[in-house]
Each structure stands twice: as C-alpha cells, then as structure tokens.
Amino acid sequence: MTATRSTALLTDRYELTMLQATLRAGTADRHSVFELFARRLSGGRRYGVVAGIGRALDAVADFRFGEDELAWLRDADVVDAETLAWLADFRFSGSIWGYPDGEIYFPQSPVVVVEGTFAECVVLETVLLSILNHDSAIATAASRMVTAAGDRPCIEMGSRRTHEASAVAAARAAYVAGFSATSNLEAGRTHGIPTTGTSAHSFTLLHDTERAAFEAQIASLGPGTTLLVDTYDIPEAIRTAVDLAGPELGGVRLDSGDLVSLARSVRQQLDDLGATSTRITVTSDLDEHAIAALAVAPVDGYGVGTSLVTGSGVPTSGFVYKLVSRADDDGTMVSVAKKSADKVSVGGRKHAVRRLDVHGRAQAEVIGIGSAPHSDSDDRPLLVELVRDGERVHHDTLEAARARLQSALAELPAAARQLSKGDPVLDTVYEQETP
Amino acid sequence: MTATRSTALLTDRYELTMLQATLRAGTADRHSVFELFARRLSGGRRYGVVAGIGRALDAVADFRFGEDELAWLRDADVVDAETLAWLADFRFSGSIWGYPDGEIYFPQSPVVVVEGTFAECVVLETVLLSILNHDSAIATAASRMVTAAGDRPCIEMGSRRTHEASAVAAARAAYVAGFSATSNLEAGRTHGIPTTGTSAHSFTLLHDTERAAFEAQIASLGPGTTLLVDTYDIPEAIRTAVDLAGPELGGVRLDSGDLVSLARSVRQQLDDLGATSTRITVTSDLDEHAIAALAVAPVDGYGVGTSLVTGSGVPTSGFVYKLVSRADDDGTMVSVAKKSADKVSVGGRKHAVRRLDVHGRAQAEVIGIGSAPHSDSDDRPLLVELVRDGERVHHDTLEAARARLQSALAELPAAARQLSKGDPVLDTVYEQETP
C-alpha cells in the first residue's frame, strides 16, 4: 500500500472514448468547469460531512498513464493512437477548489469545482466521484455516531465488513468525523490514525480455560489491557479478570446480549470488586441509534463496525460530477445544463458561503452563480483553493479536518444533532449574478 | 494497481496482539480450524453467491511482512520484538478449503475452512472477511439482477458510487454473477472483464449543438456506437441520431424519466425511422425490482450502478470467522464454540454437500460435523481444496465461476428466482458425527 501507483485506470471507459471523440472534433481543449455536488441528502440526513479531499488530491497527482496503462489500453483497443499519445503526456494542469475535509455540505453545495480543458477535467470524473462518494458517506454516518456518543469515545472496527481498501479509507473518514481510533493497522500506517485492539473470542477458546486465556493476555499486554468477557459466563469472567489483573484492570469488552442491562450489572460487579476505574467498552452491532440508547448505561466507549463502514443505511453520498460551464468557439464561457426530466442541473460556475448571523449561527447555504454571493462580513466562505494550475496548494492534516468539523457543527441549529430522518437543517439559496 | 504489494497490514490490530500473547503463552502453535460462514442471509435473500475466493487466495499469498510493515509495527509499538521476528518469517503454511467463486451458499455453510496453527490462521481473519464479505454481497445482489433481466445483458457501471478499489472488485463479483461487462477499465486490466461505455451528458453539453456532439461521437466511434439521447428533447435527439448514423445506429441510451413508456415510444420512433436493429439501453438508478418492472418494455440492456456496488440494500454478507476446533496440550483436537447469548456458534470442523434428488434438484444444504455427511451418490460436495500445506492449488477462471453459478442456480427450487424477501430456499441440516 506504500508504493505510488497510477490511479489512471480507476476510470469509466466512457471518459476516454469521450476524450477521443473531442480530440478528433477539436473540442477537447474548450475551457470547462465541472462541479461535484449532491442533489439531495439521502436517508433523511440533516447535513453531510465532506471527507476524501486529501485522498482525491493524491489520486489526481497519481493520475498518470504509464507504460503499463498505455499498453493495456492499446491491447484492449479502448482508444486510438492519437488519444494514447495525449494520455502519455497527461498531467492535470487546471485548478480545483473544494470544501475541505471536515466541512459540512448541503444539497447543491459545490463540494468540488474543477476548471481546465474539457479533456483534463472529464477524465478525473470517475475517481473523484468514487473517493468523495465513499468517504463522505462514511464520515456523515460517523458524525451522527459521534454526536450520539457525546463525550464517550467511538472506535472504528469495521474493516472486516467492507472491501479491504475501503476499510482504510473508512477509518480515515471516521477519524475526520471524530472517532478516536481504528482497529485497522494500514490506516495507522497510511493516515497516522491511532490503532487499538486486544483480543477476540477465538483467543479465549484457544486456551484450556478462560482463566488461562486472561493470564496469557495480561502477561503479554499488562493489566491495563481490555479483556473480552462474554465468551462463557460474564460474572464468572469478571471475577476471574479482576482476580488476575487486580483493580487496575484496564477494561472489559462486551460483544453480545442486552448491553444496557449488562453494562449496569458489570459496572456494579466491577465496583463491588474495587475495580472502579476499569472501563466498559461495548461492540455488538452498534449504530447511532443503539449508541443513543446506551447513553443511560455506564458505558465508557463504543466500538462500531458494520454500520460505520456501510454508512448506516446510506453507503454512498449521491455526488454527481456535471459540466456547468464551457467555452464557445470564440472563448466566451457559456453556462450549460441538461434538461432531462428528473435530473435537472443548474448551469454556471458556483461560489458558496455559509450565511451566519451575528452570533455565528448558520442561517443558510448561499450559492452564487457566476460570482460570489453578496456577502455580509459574518458569512463564511466555503470553497478553498486545492490545486492551482496543476500544482497542489492544499495540504491539510486530519487533525485540522477534525477541528473544522467541530466548528462547523457548532454553527448549525440544534436540529442537526437529531438522529431522526428529516430535511437538511439549512436551506440552500441561490443568488443569481446580475449582469 | 499492478505492483505486488503486501496485504499484511489490512488487518485488525487485535490479530497481532493475540499473536503476541499466544507466542508468549506457548499456545500459538496449537493446531486450529477456523471457519468463515454467515449466520443468516441478510435482507431476506433466498440464497447467497460466493465471490472473492480468487482475490482472497491472492491476498493470502501477498500476506507477508516486509521491511516497511515491520518498521511501522515497531515504531508504532504494536507488538514486541519476538512477535516482529515471527512476522518477518511469516508465510501461511496451512491448508484452506472453500466454496469456489460462483458457488451458492446458505446460512451456516462453511464457505471457507482454514486449518493450521492458531497463529497462522488468526492473522488472516480480517483480510479474508473483508474480501468475502464485500465481494459476495455484490455477487448476491448482482445475481438477482441477472435473474430479473432474463436474456437481456446487464452492464456494471457503479464505479463512481463506491470506493475506487471496491469498484474493481465489484466489477469482478458482478461478472461472476453473470453481468456481461463493466465500465471500469482497471477491472478490464486486472480481471480481463469486457469493458464498455461511450459518452455522458457532459459530452453533449460541451458541443454547440446536440447534432455536433453526435457527429463527433459517430466520427470517432462509428455508427455502431450508442448515443445518449436524453440531454434535451428525446424525439428530436432520435431523429438527429438516425439522420446522422443511418439505420445502422448501434444503440441509444436513456438515463432518466419513466423508462417503460419512454422505451416504448423510442422503440416505435426508431422502427418508424427504419432503425429496427438499434438497441435501447437504460441506465437510471436501476435495481433488480426496476429491472423486473422493465421486462414488459422493449429494452435491450440494463446499466446498473449504485444498487449493484452497494449490494442493493445489503452491502455486506455478514460472514464471521470463528475458531471451531483446536488442539489440546496433548494434541487431541477439541471442538470449541462461544456461549454468548445471541451469537452461538457450532463447534467442530464442518464438511458440506448439497443434497440433490435423482433429478438433480437441490433438497438441502447438509453439513457434517467432524466428518463428511453420509452421502448419496447424487449429493454434490461443496468444499474444494484451495491451499494445501501453504501451496495454492486452486486456480479458477472467472468464466468457470460464471458457469458454476448457472449450474448451481439451476439446481435450486423456483422460489430462488423470486425477488421478494423470504427464507433461504434450502434448509441447512446438520449431521453429527457418531463416534
């Protein structure tokens, strides 16, 4: 996973057949603006969280056609020789603006704006959508879980429930959204996310007795480790655990059963045994609703797997990538939009601010068409420059993205923290350019 | 995507902390059997389709800890020096059996059986689950779409809706399930799947007129190309298309609107214009139910995106990986299973056959515990040898997997082809070893 590799074939074939046709027609170099946005927030989400911008910028940098890629395209007869020659020299030389990782978005928010020739913008479509659609869906679900968990930490542990590479990206997205750690080691290496984990049921079953298993774990990881206590009988396991580790036992993990009542009885038993600072982590098929229901229970942390990596019912963000403006023969920029019955787009280059009142409370997502909205000083501009004339100018840390989301969430109405399905908490308002 | 790379860190941290504890306790080398199975079929699916076995075997071969992996594990203080030394020498030397790609599975089917030392089996847990959980979920959804489509081809075009690497695996899984092609170029290169695609709305919008766009596409791709006809006015687009390409126009694509009525009017118009062999492909947010509803319409092919790559509501298969048998101190194998309230497992090494009647019709999924079920000659054994003493012995083609699924589906009761939610079409029956 460390070797740099081309992302160029993570691409739908039609991007390259369009390229070939425009090269032949002489329209490939028409200056163009593409925008990546969501028509709606799926699943009754109140807001969306942007994640994947950092990965998308890496993918643009690695979007190069090397010998292997060109040879395969030639052998598979995907495009003609002229197009292959163009691809061999390809390097994105346009400019990209976007909502940075951790920013919040709403329907029609211009999350990414790509400007350059038609040819260089269109070939990026598939990989940009793949990354943003996946990562933002995970971050949006994760943010709801973090909200539900309040001050208690959430740990991402869904690697086994999703594609092995998605797992790494999901850990990154969850971290942007406020998760405290991941089980995934590659996410630790690639993204610097804290990793965590101690043992599974198989470890207990391997040993002749639960006591032998706990002894082995404590001998290896110390008394501060977290013991999995639900393989056989939980009260018996707790007695054994505290007997072996003493009151400095770090934690116990519950992975089955009625977690609210179990957590209460386990807390009581731990306290009775003097293990008052031993933490209780729960990990059984949690989603944001189960986490919210556990708020009343004496739980110290949540491990979230399946529902995190599958977006808790919304596995993809519904972003599309549309041409909104392009040059005419004489270089004049023309707004464009398709008229298809159920998928109308709004033409013209977009600009966006979050309209804030004097108290810093968000009032609306304001989108200017063709120019920036007429803005009060309180408004917060949303688009940042990511790539300027082919050079990446945005280098964000995940810590910055985490902080950005916290700030952006604090601006939103309280309804944003409701888990129920509903409308977006901000309306999206267009301001048309007055020529 | 072509360079061989280590899969070793696509792993939950607890696999390695368990390894460390067992190395220290002297239990790491206990002979063990792990099984990968689903407790149930999520989403009311009638059957599951195995996909990912070929990728899983690649991942096991690439599961090696190189200098980079070891350095990171050391720097991040994940495991101790003894464990790092063990990992440096790691190469899976056990044996693996499994249901091959394209085989059908049911609840409790032992889809993968891994046998070796505890240490070498446990470290494979995460990556095996990631691959099988993802790929089989996609293949299961895809199989329902192929069934709904009947003789009409389905094209996979969901790359943009899922993680960029998942997209490649999803194309593979869909192909196993009977899809005819994919939009994804990397899937073409990596897995040899036919790729397809011509143009998007942006291509039409780039040009001064729809006619200019169609001219450009036909000049580049020939009159046999498929033109996207719903950017502006469909009847006008059809007239232009046939005017330019003649009756040998290859196809038209509809990506919006009421597809049943649209397909009828488009077919009528094409026929009236003499383009009687021009094909109609539809591609707007299709799933298996929409495909079934289009059976009455004159449609020649389906392009499926979002619902395919997200498993049409079931994005993960729910496979777990459980220790079912392990050696005692004296080498005697002992069946093991946890007793947790809601997640009971069945201990003991499993064997499996599909019970067939004399007409080749499937009657039950029969699982023998500890030994093969007492079998009639009509029964079909389901587990094949994949890895023997560390050597991969199974090399399947995707074409073989496609044919296997067709045969396995033909054995099932007719209810398997129903799209409604329901119980698995076969019961799973255990046959206990009689000692």
Image (cartoon, coloured by chain):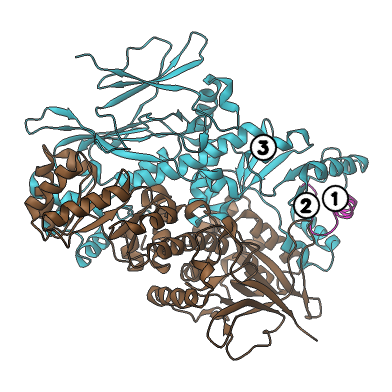
Chain colours: A brown, B cyan
Q: Residue furthest bottom?
A: A377
Judging by the rendered image, the residue that carries numbered circle 2 is: B227
Q: Which mark is residue B153?
A: 3
Among the two numbered marks 1 and 2 on one chain, the one whose residue lies closer to the N terminus: 2
Among the two numbered marks 3 and 2 on one chain, the one whose residue lies closer to the N terminus: 3
Q: Count up the numbered dots.
A: 3
Measured in 3D between alpha carbons, the distance from the residue under mark 3 to the one under mark 2, in whole angstroms, is 18 Å
Q: Which mark is residue B245?
A: 1
* A375 to A140, vertically: above or below: below
Q: Is residue A94 visible?
A: no
Mark 1 and mark 2 in contact? Answer it, CB < 8 Å.
yes
Among the two numbered marks 1 and 3 on one chain, the one whose residue lies closer to the N terminus: 3
Residue at position x 48%, y 62% in the image: A6
> In the shown orientation, is residue A387 left or right of residue B226?
left
Q: Amino acid at mark 1?
A: Ala
Quarter-of-image position of residue A213: top left
